[in-house]
Amino acid sequence: MKKTFIALLFLMSTVAYGQSAFAKAEQLFKAEKFDKAQIAFTKLYEQDHSDLDVIERLGDIASHQNNFEKAMGYYKKLIDSNSKSARYNFKYGGAMGLYAKSSSKLKALGMLDDIKKHLKKAAELDPKHIESRHALSQLYCELPGIVGGSISKSRSYADQLIKISPVDGHLAHGYIDEYEEEYDDAVVSYQKAVDTGGSLLTYRKLASIYQHKLNDDKKALETLKKASLKHIDTQLKADILSLESKIEMND
């Protein structure tokens, strides 16, 4: 009885330690202290190679460090453990896609089918999965037609996004408009994103089109000033001052 109690006590303390260590590692991750978080999660992984939460975080850290090949290795372990997870399929397919971008064209072409497979599977497994549809919309937009690129398919995923999250759908359509150099249409799409969501990102997307594609600094400034009424952001203030100075010099 005594030995059983001691064994249970040891087990409980070990679990508590593991939970505490994970919480501390997670704090480092959320604070974007990725080097320290990597050390903490690696120690946890060494203690338990089957902890999927730890494996996922190590993959996330590798992704943040732009080490997509390493991230793929961790995410592959997740897929092998649970191939029915939309999140796991998205992360694996996404890491593959980003790794392919930095690889040779021949190597990237060889990975294309797997990238599509996992991103599509994520979208199929979760009818409301936003990130996978964003990735697929961008992928089909950027791919040359000869290897399966299709603006109509890209638009179809953007349309799906509008039904799930209107602001994400308008941003996706804006991206396609911009890629196709249809800048007036991009203004319309990004303005819809501003009206629907109003995040700082939506304002910046709209301002960027005005400034860098339509050469309309005044419209860009007007957009950033509207953003400043809703968002307190140091960089935003600096960008407004910089644009004001540029306009004054050109007048």
Image (cartoon, helix red, strand yellow):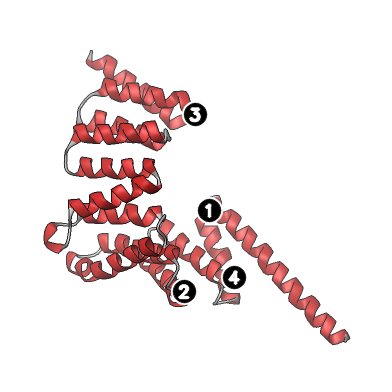
Residue 6 located left or right of residue 110:
right
Whichever of callouts 1 and 4 sits on the residue coming sooner in the sequence is 1
Q: Which mark is residue 82?
A: 2
* Residue at left offset 33%, top offset 63%: 119
Check the image and report above or below for 248 versus 207.
above
Which residue carries the number 3 mark?
232
Mark nearer the viewer, 1 or 2: 2
Farthest residue, direction right: 2
Report, in whole angstroms, how far the alpha carbon at label 1 lies from the one at label 4: 17 Å
Name the secondary structure under disc 3. Answer: loop
Whichever of callouts 3 and 4 sits on the residue coming sooner in the sequence is 4
* Residue at left offset 27%, top offset 63%: 100
Name the secondary structure under disc 2. Answer: loop
Mark nearer the viewer, 3 or 1: 3
Residue 37 seen anywhere in this rendered image of the structure:
yes
Local packing at callout 1 (Cα closer than 10 Å; few below 14, some 14-19, many 20+) is: some
Report, in whole angstroms, how far the alpha carbon at label 1 lies from the one at label 2: 28 Å
Which residue carries the number 4 mark?
44
Local packing at callout 4 (Cα closer than 10 Å; few below 14, some 14-19, many 20+) is: some
Tell me residue 26's x, y (percent): 58, 58
Pick the residue in front: 168 or 218: 168
Residue 202 located left or right of residue 50:
left
Farthest residue, direction left: 146
Instruction: Indicate the amino acid at tag 1.
Output: Lys
Residue 102 seen anywhere in this rendered image of the structure:
no
Report, in whole angstroms, how far the alpha carbon at label 3 lies from the one at label 1: 24 Å
Which residue carries the number 1 mark?
33
Name the secondary structure under disc 1. Answer: loop
Tell me residue 44's x, y (percent): 59, 70
Report, in whole angstroms, how far the alpha carbon at label 4 lies from the one at label 2: 20 Å
